[in-house]
Image (cartoon, helix red, strand yellow):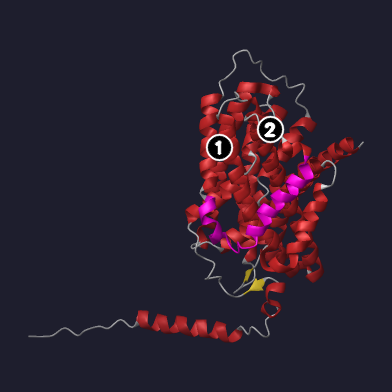
């Protein structure tokens, strides 16, 4: 009986040894003390660690957070967008949603542009490419924009409380004591906000966000009946300035890109960021279109910026108002993560003072709309593309789809985007005069 020789395959074993040698070589080459990025640590934002302690959030939680960031306080205003721009508002929603997804993709890719590192956040990119002074300037700008966004949410909460008091036949003390009410609202947000250190701490309140959107959609379907007597929009009255006002509000809705590095850093599976962000933005776009079309079809150009005011004065309005207030409050807490983050203790007093000063400014809503349009154009569209090109170069994407996408984004931001910002400035000067 002949025994066949046994052939032993060492290829897998040799490959394992080779991989270990490569890893050892890489680790030996990378010296944290000598690395120009690591030696500056959090000040620079380029850290070698993979944030294992932070990566606990599921994809479903990230999608819920994205929906909340985009829809907070803005769902009742979407019919007003169509009142400003006619049915063209549907295309505006689709267009800005697509640009936001591309911006999210390029921004997160830019964070990994340095081999073996993951840059910390948005401002660390400015520090890496332009130096410490530019990084500090970008941090000031992003903090100001985020503070203005929190200010809008505070005013939205107060406005909804005012509507709740009026619809329940109670005394409207908000209008009589607005500054005091705003200061109390800030304290109610900021004090618990200092104890929220990561997106994982917001898991419970994140559930409120998609539930709120679903409830508003259901109410819109039930309450908003198409008006057969409503004439089609006269497009001679829908001109570029009015379209721009609607576009500015949509840009403000989708201007939560500053939160994206923090969301991605908390994901269990960061490689699925592009898919997760696409789903979150897609669901937001669908909900915006449904609410906007139903509200505009029912009330036409007479729809209020908070279309709850157009609905029948029944228990529905107080119910919706409370739901929106809960979502607004939860998203204010989420926003505190980015505003303060690693500078939580040092900036605590300063931020409260800044917000209180901003509340004293006349036409605060117009200032925040201006900040929202600047954020939507530059922070969400132009800068992510610029960072991506600086990190990876443009040659490899020149003849690919990415090259066309980036060219379109830059062209839109530097032309139509700047026009939107100029229109917001003109609206502000008109009110000041």
In this figure, which residue is indicated by the disc labeled 2? Answer: 81
Residue pushed farthest left? Answer: 1
Quarter containing the C terminus? top right
Residue 27, given in percent of the width and then of the height, sits at 56, 83
Separation of marks 1 and 2 at Cα, in angstroms: 14 Å
Residue 104, given in percent of the width and then of the height, sits at 62, 54
Task: Assign the magenta stretch its main secondary structure.
Answer: helix
Residue 399, given in percent of the width and then of the height, sits at 64, 54
Front residue (pair 72, 195): 195
Front residue (pair 277, 113): 277
Q: Give the secondary structure at mark 2.
A: helix
Q: Residue at x 63, y 32 (%)?
A: 90
Front residue (pair 338, 82): 338
Residue pushed farthest right? Answer: 433
Quarter containing the N terminus? bottom left
State which quadrant residue 223 falls in: top right
Is tag 1's residue or tag 2's residue first in the polypeptide sequence? 2
Residue 197, can we see it?
Answer: yes
Q: Is residue 403 left or right of residue 11?
A: right
Mark 1 crowdedness (10 Å alpha carbons): few <14, some 14-19, many ≥20: many
Q: Residue at x 62, y 12 (%)?
A: 229
Q: Is residue 254 above or below residue 144?
A: above
Contact, CB < 8 Å: mark 1 with mark 2?
no
Residue 196, given in percent of the width and then of the height, sits at 60, 61
Q: Residue at x 55, y 21 (%)?
A: 225
In this figure, which residue is indicated by the disc labeled 1? Answer: 287
Tally of numbered discs: 2
Residue pushed farthest top? Answer: 229
Q: Is residue 297 magenta?
A: no
Q: Which region shows up in magenta?
A: 177-206
């Amino acid at each position: 009986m002949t025994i066949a020789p046994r052939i032993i395959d060492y290829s897998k074993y040799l490959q394992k040894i080779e991989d270990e040698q490569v890893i050892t070589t890489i680790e030996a080459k990378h010296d944290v003390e000598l690395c120009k990025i690591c030696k500056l640590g959090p000040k620079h934002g380029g850290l070698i660690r993979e944030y294992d302690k932070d990566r606990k959030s599921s994809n479903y939680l990230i999608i819920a957070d994205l929906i909340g960031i985009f829809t907070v306080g803005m769902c009742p205003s979407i019919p007003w967008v169509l009142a400003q721009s006619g049915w063209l508002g549907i295309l505006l929603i689709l267009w800005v949603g697509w640009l936001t997804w591309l911006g999210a993709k390029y921004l997160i890719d830019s964070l990994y542009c340095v081999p073996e590192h993951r840059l910390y956040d948005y401002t660390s990119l400015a520090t890496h490419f332009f130096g410490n002074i530019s990084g500090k300037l970008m941090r000031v700008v992003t903090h100001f924009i985020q503070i203005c966004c929190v200010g809008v949410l505070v005013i939205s909460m107060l406005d909804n409380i005012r509507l709740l008091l009026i619809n329940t036949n109670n005394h409207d003390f908000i209008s009589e004591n607005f500054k005091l009410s705003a200061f109390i609202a800030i304290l109610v947000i900021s004090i618990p906000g200092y104890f929220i250190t990561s997106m994982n701490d917001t898991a419970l309140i994140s559930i409120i966000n998609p539930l709120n959107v679903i409830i508003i959609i259901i109410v819109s379907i039930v309450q908003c009946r198409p008006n057969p007597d409503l004439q089609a929009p006269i497009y001679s009255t829908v001109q570029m300035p009015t379209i721009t006002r609607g576009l500015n509000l949509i840009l403000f809705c989708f201007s939560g890109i500053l939160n994206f590095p923090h969301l991605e850093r908390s994901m269990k599976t960061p490689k699925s960021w592009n898919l997760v962000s696409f789903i979150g933005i897609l669901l937001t776009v669908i909900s915006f279109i449904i609410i906007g079309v139903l509200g505009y079809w029912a009330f036409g150009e007479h729809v209020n910026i908070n279309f709850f005011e157009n609905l029948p004065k029944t228990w529905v309005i107080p119910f919706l108002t409370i739901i929106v207030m809960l979502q607004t409050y939860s998203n204010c807490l989420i926003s505190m993560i980015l505003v303060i983050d690693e500078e939580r203790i040092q900036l605590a007093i300063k931020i409260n003072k800044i917000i209180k000063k901003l509340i004293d400014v006349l036409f605060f809503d117009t200032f925040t709309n201006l900040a929202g349009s600047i954020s939507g154009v530059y922070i969400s569209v132009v800068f992510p593309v610029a960072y991506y090109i600086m990190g990876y170069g443009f040659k490899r994407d020149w003849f690919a789809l990415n090259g066309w996408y980036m060219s379109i984004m830059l062209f839109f931001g530097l032309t139509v985007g700047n026009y939107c910002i100029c229109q917001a400035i003109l609206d502000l000067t008109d009110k000041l005069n």
